[in-house]
Image (cartoon, rainbow, N blue to C red):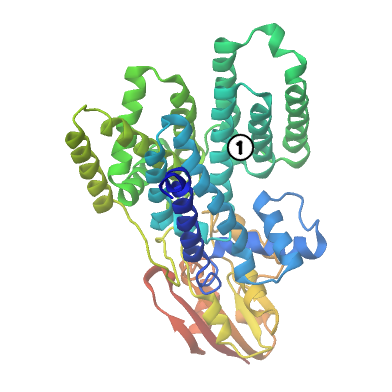
Amino acid sequence: MKSWLKKYGIWVFLGLILVYFAFLLFYQLWYQSFRIDEWYSSYVAKYMSLEWFYKSKYFLSEWLQALCFKFWWLNDFWARFPSVVIHLVSMLLMYLIPAKLTKNKYIWMVSFLVFWSLYREQWWARDARFYSLVQMMFLLWIYAILMWMEKGKAMYLNLAILITGLWVIFHPFLYCLWAILFWAFLYQYKKHWDWKSLFSKKYLVTWIIVIIWLVIAILFWTLWGVVKGSLTNWLSWDAKKYYFVFYTKHLWWELGIILVTWVLWMLYFLVRKKRKEVIMFTIPFLLFVYALVIKGYLMHSRYALLMMPLLVLSSVILIYYLYSFSKLKYVNIIIAIVILAATLFTTHYQFLPQNSYYFDYTSPQPDFKSAYAAIPDWKNIVSGFPTLCDWYYSSRGNCSYAIRVDLVHDWKTKVKEKQVEDYTKIAYIDNLSQLNPWTYYFVIDNLTNKSWSINKTLYKQITERWRVLFNSWESYNNIFVLEVLVK
């Protein structure tokens, strides 16, 4: 029995944690209303499941959502189902990657446990968007590169190139993988290869995959215009500095001592000249920072979550190095206890299931579900986000008109020029005189209300004749339904 526990005990423990975490993530997965961004993905996936070629460009996550909608049901649970499953895979990778780097079974478990218990990671895993897929693919890419460097087998290099190519097609944020792959390629060539082996039959499939992805990338760049914009955007350098401070503060608020240990580990890389770790962790982090601060045009704290697996892995491995620092066992135990205690007190964890998860003002989550449930069947709806009207009300009626909302700071110019909403093609209204005499129900959330300068004529008319049918006042998650009689 003891030998069995010694051999399989850690896998049993890992399995139990995975089962509990799956329960944590699936618990009331359908309960919380969609965020605005969740429905942008789910709306496209919904019509992909009906038509398959609804739009010219998709994210990989939308294909997964479309499959769930196609073979099961169109509801919040199945929209979020792929994210949860993908996040469970990420958890396993957060176990396996430290295993390759440290060869210590206990530090694997620390990385795994820290990652699964982070509040923001649980929030993200329950989100019907592509973020958890970005994390999983990136972690899988790291694992493939590590296996390639360790074993020298072309199949792992092929896997890394396949993942890189997928992101060229499905999301531009991880173009940085090409740069890191190139660096890893040079590192491996210098260590093991020569020109003869590089072009041998062993790597024939590799070169075929590279050529295929290059052709696909060129097609996407030229025909579909997937890559747009310059190396920097229209933001001033003062704004970019503010972005940097904003994301740094957010990471400190979420991770605390974990962020500090990452900085210390980077310094350790420089001193010890650990090239493998530089390729795996330092370069991606710097390129993520570039994408967020220099290239990004919208500031959302949730984007910083892309860095969290890197930070957790780095922190946990540094803790392992510190734990092994002294030959005196009690000193190592004291070091480990101090660091773990500091982590617990400075990092946001969640160990128990809950119905709803909330982020901050950069990711508003009004209760759209309750708002639409309060409206009687077959009424005329006017909404700032008709996509959510389509999701929560389409079985009982239709969204008649839309209200202009400024989401990307194009207000008074491009926003006012638009005549229909981008996704649903529902017409915008400027004033009540455009409506036929009838009773209309206006669904106005906080973001829609913030665009009052675009809709001030409409809002002035509404205030003269509204009756509040539903309201939910939760700081930046405000939403209300107004019954308006148009004569």
Number of marks: 1
- Judged left or right of residue 119, residue 96 is right
Q: Position of residue 260 (x, y in %)?
A: 29, 38
Q: Nearer the viewer, residue 447 or 477?
A: 477
Of 458 and 467, nearer the camera is 467
Q: Residues within 10 Å of mark 1 (few under 14, many from 20)?
A: few
Residue at the (69%, 13%) spot, across then down: 198
Rendered-image quadrant of the C terminus: bottom right
In the image, residue 372 sits, relative to residue 172, either above or below, namely below
Q: Amino acid at mark 1?
A: Gly
Q: Residue furthest front?
A: 1
* Residue at the disc numbered 1: 229
Answer left or right for 201 relative to 293.
right
Q: Residue at x 62, y 77 (%)?
A: 392
Residue 102, can we see it? yes
- Please state the horizontal and vertical placement of residue 383, each as a whole percent of the image: 59, 75
Q: Position of residue 90 (x, y in %)?
A: 53, 47
Q: Is residue 70 left or right of residue 272?
A: right
Q: Which residue does the image show at 72% across and 60% down from the upper left?
A: 66
Residue 294: tell me if it is visible: no
Q: Position of residue 162 (x, y in %)?
A: 69, 34
Tag 1 secondary structure: loop
Residue drawn at (42%, 65%), measured in percent from left and top?
Answer: 358
Position of 266 relative to 335 (above/below): above
Indicate whether 189 appears above or below 452.
Answer: above
- 487 is higher (above) or lower (below) than 460: below
